[in-house]
Image (spheres, helix red, strand yellow):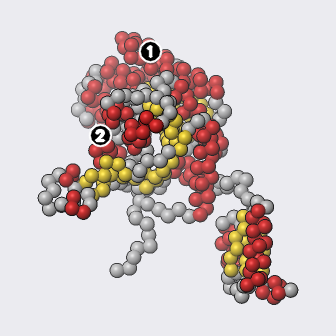
Amino acid sequence: MALSKKPVTGMRDILPGEMQIRDYVIGVIKETYGKFGFTSIEAPCMENIANLTNKQGGENEKLIFKVLKRGEKLNVAQAQEEGDVVDFGMRYDLTVPLVRYYSNNAAQLPSPFKALQIGNVWRADRPQKGRYRQFTQCDIDIFGEASNLAEIELILATTTTLGRIGFKDFEIRINDRQLLKAMAADSGFSEEAYDSVFVTLDKMDKIGTDGVRAELLESGFAEEIVDKYLELYRGLEQAGNGLQYVVEKLGGRQAQVSPAAEGLREIIDSVNAAKTADFRMVFDPTLVRGMSYYTGPIFEVSIPGLGISCGGGGRYDKMVGKFTGKDVPACGFSIGFERIILLLTESGFRVPDTPKKIAYLVEKGVEGQAMADVIAKAQAARESGEQVLVVRMNKNKKFQKEQLTAEGYEEFVEFYREALKN
C-alpha cells in the first residue's frame, strides 16, 4: 500500500512564508515578555491522564488524545474500563502542565515566579478553518502574587505585545468569577448548577438573551429563576456603568461583590493609566471563560471588527493545591497565537526589517575553484547583512526566478562557467 503524503486529519504542514511570520511573532513575544520579567520554561507534551481529567479543563477534557499503555502493561483482552489501557494523554492546554511543573519545582523557582510558555497542544476537535487538532499556544503566568498586580502585569505585557505586532483598536473584556457566582446565587441557582449555567451564559453573544433563556429552561431550570437571572442582564444593557449596576443590584451580597468590583476597578484604572497600545478596557458581565478552574478576575482579547477573540485568561488560585495540598495564588494570560498568525497571513503581512534576499544562480558545470569563488562571494555578502541563497540554475530559469520571487528574493546574480574562467 502506498504511503500517504497528506498530514493527519486536523493537522497541517506549515510552508516557509507562514513559518517566517510565525518565527517573527514568536521573537516579538519573547522579547516583549522578557522585558516584563517573564522567563521561558518547557514542560513535557504528555501528562498523566489523571492530571488531565480532574474536571478542571471544562469541555476540553472530552477532546484529549489518550495514550495507550505500552508493552506488558497493555492488556486489551482483560481491560474492563479505560483506565486499564490508558495512562498518559497529550496536553490540551499549557495551564495544567504548568501547574504540575510549578508544583514539582517550586523549591528551585523564585517567588513570585513569572513563566512564559510557547508550545504545541492537541485536541481531538472537529477540524475547520483556523481550528486544528495540533496548534501552538503562548501563555504567560504568575505564581505567588495574590494582589491585582498579577492581573495588571499580565494585561499590560499582553497588550504591549499585541501592539508591537501591529494590532490596534481592540478590547480587553474583563469580569470576575465571584460576580458571576453572586448573580447566579442571587437569582436562585444552586452552586452545583453554576458550571452548567455559565456554559449557557457564555453563548449570549451568539444566541442572545432569548436563546440563553430557552436553553436554560430546556436544561430543567425553573422559569422564575431563569427570568430573574436574565432580568439582571437585561438591566445591564441599559445601565451606563455596568459594574456599579451589579454592585447596587446585589446589595445583599456585598461581602462577595464589593471586593471583586473594587478589584476590577483597580485593574481597569491601573492598566488605562500605564498602557502603551491602542485598546479599551471593557467590563463584560457575560464573560465566562470555559475553564472551571478560574477563581477570580477573568479577561479576554476581543477584536470587535472581526467578531473574534484572540486570547484570554484569569486567576486560578486553587489549582496548585490539588497537586501539593497547599494553595498558591496563580494567574495567567494566553495569546491566541494561531488566530493572530491567521489574521496576519490573510492581511498580507510582511515581516519588517528583514535582510535583503539575494539568490545566486550557478550554472551546472561550475565546480572546483570557480565554485569556491562563488561561495566566498556569498559569505562576504552574508557577513554584510544580506541573506544569500546559492542554488544551481534550472533549465527553466524564468520559472525558477518566479518561485524565488514569491519567496521574497529581490535580486538575482547569475554565474556561468565561461565567465568564471576569465
Which element type, helix, strand or loop, lies under badge 2? loop
Q: Is residue 137 visible?
A: no
Measured along the vertical axis of the image, is residue 254 above or below residue 87?
above
Horizontal and vertical percent for residue 389? 70, 70
The quadrant in which the N terminus is found is: bottom left
Q: Is residue 418 above or below residue 79?
A: below
Mark 2 and mark 1 residues within 8 Å of each other at the beta carbon: no
Disc 2 to disc 1, C-alpha distance? 31 Å
User: Which numbered dot is residue 247?
Assistant: none
Q: Residue at x 48, y 27 (%)?
A: 145
332 above or below 264? below
Q: Is residue 16 visible?
A: yes
The residue tagged 1 is 258
Q: Residue at x 41, y 45 (%)?
A: 93
Query: In terms of secondary structure, where does tag 1 sit?
Result: helix
The mark tally for this picture is 2
Q: Residue at x 42, y 39 (%)?
A: 105
x, y percentage for residue 296? 42, 26
- Residue 267 rendering spot, x and y as whole percentages: 54, 24
* The label number, if any, that marks residue 54 in the structure image: 2
Q: Is residue 91 above or below residue 223?
A: below
Upstream in sequence: badge 2 or badge 1: 2
Q: Nearer the viewer, mark 2 or mark 1?
A: 2
Please tell me which residue lies in front, 66 or 145. Answer: 145
- Tell me the amino acid under the disc marked 1: Ser
On-image quarter of the C terminus? bottom right
Image-based side of 144 in relation to 389, left or right: left
Give residue 187's position: percent from left, percent from top: 32, 21
For image coordinates 58% across by 49% down, the residue present is 26
